[in-house]
Image: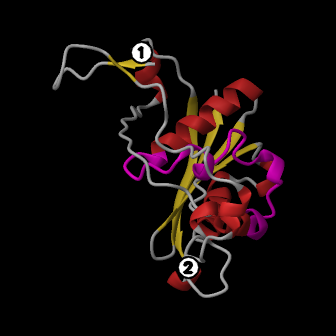
């Protein structure tokens, strides 16, 4: 794609390679990586998301305002919730946040057809999938942050817009976007495509 930054140049800049993929890394290289958090642990740089550049902006408005302005309504927010867990189990905050959001929406885990989890670490996503009893085939259909990167300044927007795109392509109606946040926090947004 071609991008133009009017603050630095009037000439387009072609971005042809993402900063994230490392094709030179082999499975043997990954097996040699040291655990990131504790001796004998399973989390390494190889099964963690990278930190990437990113920026975002989302426009949210009432459905009436959108329709009056002639904007296409992609989805409505059914429920949002945040929760926290003991910081020693950081990454599992989306479990109680999702349970709370589902209660607010009058839904159950099985009602959600499409899930986007931020996937800070592979173990973190697996913990949320297991903790909620989610069908893994409904999660991160185009890869999570390990595959796509984790731009801290726009991860929430990236996850939500990825979720909406997948829902539109696959024709699903209900989706959930979750984020684990430092020191045990979790946030979940449940959307309904219209």
Alpha-carbon neighbours of circle 2 within 10 Å: few (<14), some, or many (≥20)? some
Does 181 sit left or right of 99 as displayed?
A: left
70 is higher (above) or lower (below) than 111: above
Q: Which residue is mark 1?
A: 68
Category of crowding for the residue at label 1, using alpha-carbon neighbours closer than 10 angstroms: few (below 14), some (14–19), many (at least 20)? few
Q: Position of residue 193 (x, y in %)?
A: 65, 31
Residue 154, position in %: x, y? 41, 45
Image quadrant containing the C terminus: top right
Q: Magenta segment, which residues?
A: 129-156
**136 or 34, which is in the foreground?**
34
Asked if the magenta segment contains residue 137, the reply would be yes
Element marked by disc 1: helix
Q: What is the quadrant of residue 6 in the picture? A: top left
Q: How many marks?
A: 2
Vertical comparison of 87 with 80: above or below = below
Query: Is 71 left, or right, of 163 in this rendering?
Result: left
How is the model colour-coded? secondary structure
Res 132 → quadrant: bottom right
Q: Which mark is residue 85?
A: 2
Tell me residue 53's x, y (percent): 38, 44
At x 44%, y 54%, the residue is: 51
Farthest residue to the bottom: give it: 39
Looking at the image, can residue 20 be seen? yes
Q: Is residue 121 magenta?
A: no
Can residue 125 be seen? no
Mark 2 residue element: loop
């Amino acid at each position: 794609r071609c991008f133009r930054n009017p603050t630095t140049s009037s000439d387009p800049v072609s971005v042809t390679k993402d900063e994230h993929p490392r094709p030179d890394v082999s499975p043997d290289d990954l097996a040699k990586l040291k655990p990131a958090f504790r001796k004998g642990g399973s989390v390494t740089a190889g099964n963690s998301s990278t930190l990437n550049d990113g920026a975002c902006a989302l426009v949210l408005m009432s459905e009436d305002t959108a329709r009056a302005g002639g904007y296409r309504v992609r989805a409505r927010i059914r429920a949002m919730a945040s929760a926290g867990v003991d910081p020693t189990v950081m990454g599992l905050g989306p479990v109680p946040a999702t349970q709370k959001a589902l209660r607010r929406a009058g839904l159950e885990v099985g009602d959600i057809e499409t899930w986007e989890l931020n996937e800070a670490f592979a173990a973190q996503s697996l913990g949320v999938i297991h903790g909620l009893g989610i069908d893994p085939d409904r999660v991160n259909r185009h890869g999570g942050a390990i595959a796509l990167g984790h731009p801290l300044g726009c991860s929430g927007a990236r996850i939500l817009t990825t979720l909406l795109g997948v829902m539109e392509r696959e024709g699903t109606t209900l989706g959930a976007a979750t984020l684990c946040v430092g020191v045990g926090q979790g946030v979940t947004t449940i959307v309904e495509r219209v």
